[in-house]
Image (tube, rainbow, N blue to C red):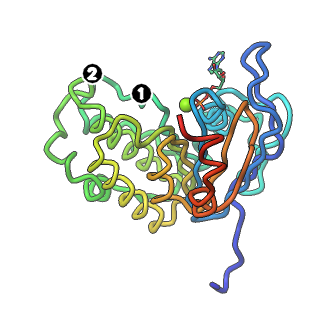
Amino acid sequence: MTPEAIQTILEVDRIDTFYGQSHVLQAVSLSIDEREVVCLLGRNGVGKTTTLRSIMGLTPPRNGRILFKGIDISKKPSFQVAQMGIGYMPDDRRIFPDLTLFENLELARRLSKRGNVQWTFEKVYDLFPALVNLKERKGSQLSGGEQKMLAIGRALMKNPDLLLLDEPSEGLAPLIVQNLAEVLGRIRDEGVTILLADQNLKFCRRTSDRGYILEKGMVQFQGTMEAIWQSEEIVKKYLVV
Ligand SMILES: Nc1ncnc2c1ncn2[C@@H]1O[C@H](COP(=O)(O)OP(=O)(O)O)[C@@H](O)[C@H]1O
Ligand SMILES: [Mg+2]
């Protein structure tokens, strides 16, 4: 054990989130310690994206609380949540198509209102060497995998303490998925806590310490990735298509 006490960085406390009349998240709770990598698992439509959007303030919860470093952020607008140190890669990545890869990163750097400058172009290119030769390429001309790397790099340029990644492994070739798992480990080693939503159990096992399994907008199981991996019953019930 390190001498410093383990700190909870994010506490989601029984949130209910709606789209109009549709009650999607039902009393979802989760808790993440600093420097953990935690994943949200579950089939399509169970509420993974909505959980990340709730944390980001994009679909704020109607009930419950979300504490980031002890501060209630559940009613804060998303720009403020970002400024407090939560980075977000949405599932559709939102790369600016008419800007070059470099300009996409540069824009994020300029928008970073945080005092710390932990992440630089060099460090992002160091994580994703494949991006170096694409600096002048327009966002619209990047492949899905390249856009994903850029979207993670862009989120890092805002120097977050907590990084939310929606479906990072989706649609990537197996070799790239393996490489991405290693990259997430390096991001964590830099002190960034990660919460990811992904349907790829192997990828989650490789990257994450713990997992939360969602179904019908509720947490059905939580435990170490090893416990999830070992439980045939859980995998069959909630994860296998
Ligand atoms: N913008 C929206 N308006 C209405 N319902 C939505 C919207 N986005 C998602 N939903 C519904 O909310 C539920 C959870 O969706 P989502 O959080 O995207 O699940 P996941 O990310 O696990 O696939 C699904 O039933 C989905 O149809
Ligand atoms: Mg989703």
Determine which quarter of the picture holds residue 48.
top right
Disc number for residue 98: 2
In this rendering, is residue 30 above or below 92? below
Q: Quadrant of residue 66?
A: top right
Residue tagged 1: 94
Quadrant for the N terminus in the image? bottom right
Q: Quadrant of residue 133?
A: top left
Q: Residue at x 68, y 58 (%)?
A: 32
Residue density around tag 2, few if under 14, some if 14–19, many if 20 or more, within 10 Å: few
Please state the horizontal and vertical placement of residue 100, each as a whole percent of the image.
23, 31
Residue 185 in the image: state x and y as whole percent: 43, 63
Nearer-the-camera pick, 201 or 196: 201
Q: Percent from the top left, x then y, of residue 131? A: 22, 45
Nearest to the observer: residue 223 or residue 126: 223
x%, y% of residue 123? Answer: 31, 59
Residue drawn at x 65%, y 41% is 237
Mark 2: secondary structure: loop
Horizontally, is 240 left or right of 8 in the view?
left
Q: Which amino acid, mark 2?
A: Asp
Q: Quadrant of ligand 2?
A: top right
User: Considering the numbered disc 1 on the image, is that residue within a helix, a strand or a loop?
Assistant: loop
Residue beneath the point at 42% across and 27% down: 94
Q: Are marks 1 and 2 in contact (CB under 8 Å)?
A: no
Q: Mark 1 is on which residue type?
A: Arg
Q: Is residue 197 above or below residue 224?
A: above
Number of the front mark, 1 or 2 = 1
Return the residue nearer the eye: 154 or 189.
Answer: 189
What is the distance, in whole Å, between disc 1 and disc 2 at their CAs? 12 Å
Number of numbered callouts drawn? 2
User: Tag 1: Cα neighbours inside 10 Å, few (<14), some, or many (≥20)?
Assistant: few
